[in-house]
Image (spheres, rainbow, N blue to C red):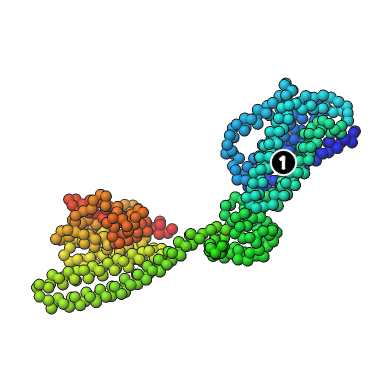
């Protein structure tokens, strides 16, 4: 057997074997799109090489031709798989590619032309010769060279998107260029195959493409995977191996941390100690660049093989605006707490003193001054009540005051609030219609502010000489509703939502007072709701709905 013939067999056989042998490694790639593309790419190159191997060793001309066409078809499949891999690798979903049906239709059209070549000979013709050894010679036609040119153009598109990704991540693309150069050498043999005696007029790309496919898999495990991960993030991103050594980074990371330049393989703590420390700190990272202070959040995503961490992706996110807003909130919270102390102590204490001295004056004024004194007493009590509402409102905004809920018996709470308002407003009539439900809800001591504000509001905004307030109760299996009806002037429909400050306007809503806004916030926090209805024949009905604390949700 001719050594040249044996050499051709060995080259194509090794190409097929190497590709098949590396498929299990390709199947270990975690990213689905690149895994699918690379596995099909390796399989197509293996079948391409196997088709040419069958073409060389098949015993009859018809079988040789069938194997050649098989390899010819899978050469086309390899091009498609390569584009699929490049698209998935660079974050372009190949299953949603534009003109997908047109591309698929074009592929099927040229594949059909290849398979039916014996009928039209547009791709190639055959001839049996004996030099340099007995074999079936393939004479390629014009259509072959046209499709070959289109295939190389498609392959070049794949290389372009890869180089683009490498540029975006700031990664060294020289290994990819070298790999392309080595794999492209067999293409020269394809072009000159018809002019050199010891070369057959075949496509010698399978060995080169096999080399490229296996090299791509090798570099994917070493570099491509980290480049893909860092390239997917617009934020600064750094890929570390299991020893926290730098494997790759994107341009955003290099601009933020100039020391990353030429840092491949170095430990992160040797390149940037502050960044390395923040991998384990629950704190933000402050960086000053060009006299501007920016604040960043450092997060790490580990990559595992079973239970072993093989690497981690470090993402640095700019949170300057968020942190500035949080700091402003902290300042406002401190100011609010200071205001609360002033309201609770200074103003309230001073008003209590004023009220005390004013009450002493009752026995020392004549009839002409009694009306003025009554007004002073009334306004003094109102200011003290307002300071209590303001205190409750500030406490409702405090996380410590509203997060912990407990079981509250509503009947006991309502009885206490009704007794309090009867003492505060002796000229008003408070009555209960029916019986108050003996149920419990999940709330805290702030629930008393809900009913106190509604009851007091029903008196203060009442235009009758004797305000009449009626409290009734409705109970469902899951909720309880308390209805507080008054005989006042009523509330127009367009004001029913606004008085609670609901929606985006909050306290800025027309007609919203701090007391009713507090009612809305608290009932919402307790899982309930509050609204206003019209009373018959006149007045308003404030409805407070709360979920009942049942034995089942007690256990939970």
Q: Provide residue 83's location: percent of width, then percent of height.
A: 66, 39
Query: Which residue appears farthest toward the left when viewing the image?
Result: 367
Q: Provide residue 121's location: percent of width, then percent of height.
A: 74, 23
Q: Is residue 470 left or right of residue 96?
A: left
Q: Residues within 10 Å of mark 1 (few under 14, many from 20)?
A: many
Q: Secondary structure at mark 1?
A: helix
User: Is residue 14 something one can see in this rendering?
Assistant: yes
Q: Measuring 64% from the left and 46% from the top, which residue is drawn there?
A: 164
Decide: is 77 above or below 376: above
- Figure quadrant of residue 443: bottom left
Query: In which quadrant of the rendered image does the C terminus lie?
Result: bottom left
Q: Residue 17 versus residue 248: which sits nearer the camera?
A: 248
Query: In which quadrant of the rendered image does the N terminus lie?
Result: top right
**How many labels were placed on the picture?**
1
Q: Is residue 150 left or right of residue 407?
A: right
Q: Measuring 22% from the left and 70% from the top, which residue is drawn there?
A: 380
- Figure quadrant of residue 95: top right
Q: Residue 189 versus residue 85: which sits nearer the camera?
A: 189
Q: Is residue 133 left or right of residue 500?
A: right
Q: Is residue 525 left or right of residue 264?
A: left
Q: Provide residue 404's location: percent of width, then percent of height.
A: 40, 64
Q: Measuring 57% from the left and 60% from the top, which residue is drawn there?
A: 298
- Figure quadrant of residue 97: top right
Query: Which residue appears farthest toward the top when viewing the image?
Result: 119
Q: Provide residue 15's location: percent of width, then percent of height.
A: 78, 40
Decide: is 46 above or below 146: below
User: Is residue 57 something one can see in this rendering?
Assistant: no
Q: Which residue is mark 1?
A: 42
Query: Which residue appears farthest toward the front when viewing the image?
Result: 290
Q: Measuring 15% from the left and 58% from the top, which residue is drawn there?
A: 464
Q: Residue 124 versus residue 13: which sits nearer the camera?
A: 124
């Amino acid at each position: 057997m001719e050594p040249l013939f044996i050499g051709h067999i060995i080259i194509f056989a090794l190409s097929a074997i190497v590709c098949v042998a590396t498929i299990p490694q390709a199947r270990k790639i975690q990213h689905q799109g690149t895994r699918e593309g690379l596995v099909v790419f390796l399989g197509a190159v293996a079948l391409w090489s196997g088709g040419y191997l069958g073409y060389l060793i098949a015993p009859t001309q018809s079988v040789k031709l069938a194997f050649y066409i098989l390899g010819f078809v899978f050469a086309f499949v390899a091009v498609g798989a390569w584009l699929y891999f490049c698209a998935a690798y660079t974050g372009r979903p190949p299953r949603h590619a534009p003109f997908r049906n047109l591309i698929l239709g074009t592929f099927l059209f040229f594949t059909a032309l290849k398979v039916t070549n014996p009928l039209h000979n547009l791709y190639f013709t055959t001839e049996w010769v004996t030099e340099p050894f007995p074999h079936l010679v393939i004479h390629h036609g014009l259509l072959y060279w046209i499709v070959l040119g289109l295939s190389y153009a498609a392959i070049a598109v794949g290389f372009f998107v890869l180089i683009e990704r490498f540029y975006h991540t700031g990664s060294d693309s020289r290994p990819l260029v070298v790999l392309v150069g080595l794999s492209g050498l067999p293409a020269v043999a394809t072009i000159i195959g018809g002019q050199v005696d010891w070369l057959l007029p075949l496509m010698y790309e399978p060995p080169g493409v096999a080399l490229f496919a296996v090299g791509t898999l090798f570099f994917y495990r070493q570099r491509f995977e980290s480049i893909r991960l860092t390239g997917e993030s617009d934020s600064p991103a750094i890929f570390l191996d299991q020893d926290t050594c730098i494997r790759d980074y994107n341009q955003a990371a290099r601009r933020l941390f100039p020391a990353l330049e030429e840092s491949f393989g170095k430990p992160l703590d040797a390149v940037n100690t502050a960044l390395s420390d923040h991998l384990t700190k629950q704190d933000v990272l402050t960086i000053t660049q060009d006299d501007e202070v920016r604040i960043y959040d450092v997060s790490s995503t580990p990559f595992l093989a079973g239970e072993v961490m093989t690497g981690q992706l470090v993402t640095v996110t700019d949170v300057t605006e968020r942190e500035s807003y949080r700091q402003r909130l902290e300042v406002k919270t401190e100011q609010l707490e200071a205001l609360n102390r002033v309201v609770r102590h200074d103003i309230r204490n001073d008003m209590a003193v004023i009220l005390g001295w004013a009450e002493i004056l009752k026995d020392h004024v004549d009839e002409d001054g009694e009306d003025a004194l009554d007004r002073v007493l009334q306004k003094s009590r109102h200011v003290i009540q307002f300071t209590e509402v303001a205190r409750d409102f500030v406490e409702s905004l405090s996380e410590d005051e509203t997060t912990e809920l407990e079981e509250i018996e509503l009947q006991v709470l309502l009885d206490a609030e009704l007794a309090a308002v009867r003492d505060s407003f002796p000229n008003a009539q408070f009555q209960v219609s029916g019986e108050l439900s003996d149920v419990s809800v999940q709330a805290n001591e702030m629930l008393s502010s809900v009913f106190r504000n509604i009851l007091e509001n029903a008196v203060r905004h009442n235009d009758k000489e004797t305000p009449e307030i009626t409290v009734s109760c409705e109970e469902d299996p899951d909720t309880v509703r308390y209805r507080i009806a008054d005989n006042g002037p009523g509330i127009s429909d367009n004001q029913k939502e606004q008085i609670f400050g609901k929606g985006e306007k909050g306290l800025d809503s027309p007609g919203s007072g701090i007391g009713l806004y507090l009612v809305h916030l608290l009932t919402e926090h307790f899982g309930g709701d509050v609204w206003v209805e019209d009373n018959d024949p006149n007045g308003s009905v404030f409805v407070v709905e709360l979920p009942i604390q049942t034995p089942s949700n007690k256990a939970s």
